[in-house]
Image (cartoon, coloured by chain):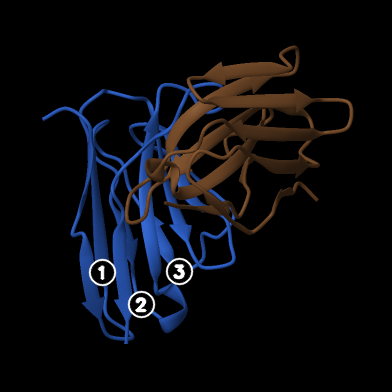
Chain colours: A brown, B blue
Amino acid sequence: KNQVEQSPQSLIILEGKNCTLQCNYTVSPFSNLRWYKQDTGRGPVSLTIMTFSENTKSNGRYTATLDADTKQSSLHITASQLSDSASYICVVSSYSSASKIIFGSGTRLSIRP
Amino acid sequence: DAGITQSPRYKITETGRQVTLMCHQTWSHSYMFWYRQDLGHGLRLIYYSAAADITDKGEVPDGYVVSRSKTENFPLTLESATRSQTSVYFCASSGGYSYNEQFFGPGTRLTVL
């Protein structure tokens, strides 16, 4: 069964600290993996996308990694800011069908001043 | 304004009533999607459309009907609402189904009493 599992479910850190969110998947055949940020009460917004051949991609203070062999990805946030408080969703796509876009349940990140 | 919009933003209805959620995008994206988001679950695909007059089921289509007579509109209808359909509904559009980023609307919070 195609699945995307994220950990931790929730995380609280102090402003200025770094953190890493995890994503494990079993989607096959794999096409790409995308991280979305979802602010409370809003739709998700894409942060990064990675294909099979890419193992690191950055977007400002956000750095995503992908290990296609172990089917794991991480999202590292550097020097966190209060505006980083949101849910972060890992999404894995299979190239076989538009219905094979699997969303993880997300990690809810809270940044404390 | 350019973008993707949903209406209404909030809706309360009663069991057994028909409800239609509207989605409109101005990018002329070929693909459009409907998701529901519930606590403890990731976004789950209800229906998607690859082009006008082409629709297909996602993971949780039962109890929902869609149509797409124009590229820019993708309404979702609950023919006879049930309490289990209480959820937040997101519409998204994309230039493609896999690699292309999905752009999400602001969501519709639906409560079925």
Which of the marked residues, 2 or 3, is nearer the chain's N terminus? 3
Do the residues indicated by labels 2 and 3 lie within the same chain of the protein?
yes
Label 3 sits on residue: B63
* Measured Cα–Cα span from mark 2 to mark 1: 7 Å
Subunit bearing disc 1: B
- Describe the element under mark 2 as helix, strand or loop: loop
Circle 2 Cα neighbour tier, 10 Å, few/some/many (<14 / 14–19 / ≥20) = many
Do the residues indicated by labels 3 and 1 lie within the same chain of the protein?
yes
Whole-percent x, y for residue B102 in the image = 43, 32
Whole-percent x, y for residue B54 in the image = 42, 36
Instruction: Look at 64% across and 20% down and name the residue there.
Output: A50
Q: In this view, does A100 lie above or below B80?
A: above
Quarter holding the C terminus of chain B?
bottom left
| CB-based contact (under 8 Å), mark 2 and mark 1 | yes
Residues B1 and B53: in front is: B1
Q: What residue type is labelled 1?
A: Val
Q: What residue type is labelled 3?
A: Gly
* Measured Cα–Cα span from mark 2 to mark 3: 8 Å
Instruction: Look at 47% across and 78% down and name the residue there.
Output: B84
Instruction: Look at 33% across and 32% down and name the residue there.
Output: B52
Circle 1 Cα neighbour tier, 10 Å, few/some/many (<14 / 14–19 / ≥20) = some
Whole-percent x, y for residue A77 in the image = 57, 33
User: Can residue B55 be seen here?
Assistant: no
Label 1 sits on residue: B19
- Describe the element under mark 3 as helix, strand or loop: loop
Circle 3 Cα neighbour tier, 10 Å, few/some/many (<14 / 14–19 / ≥20) = few
Q: Which residue lies furthest to the left in this view?
A: B1
Lateral position of residue A11 relative to residue A68, left or right: left
Image quadrant of residue B71? top left
Q: Which amino acid does label 2 sit on?
A: Ala
Label 2 sits on residue: B81
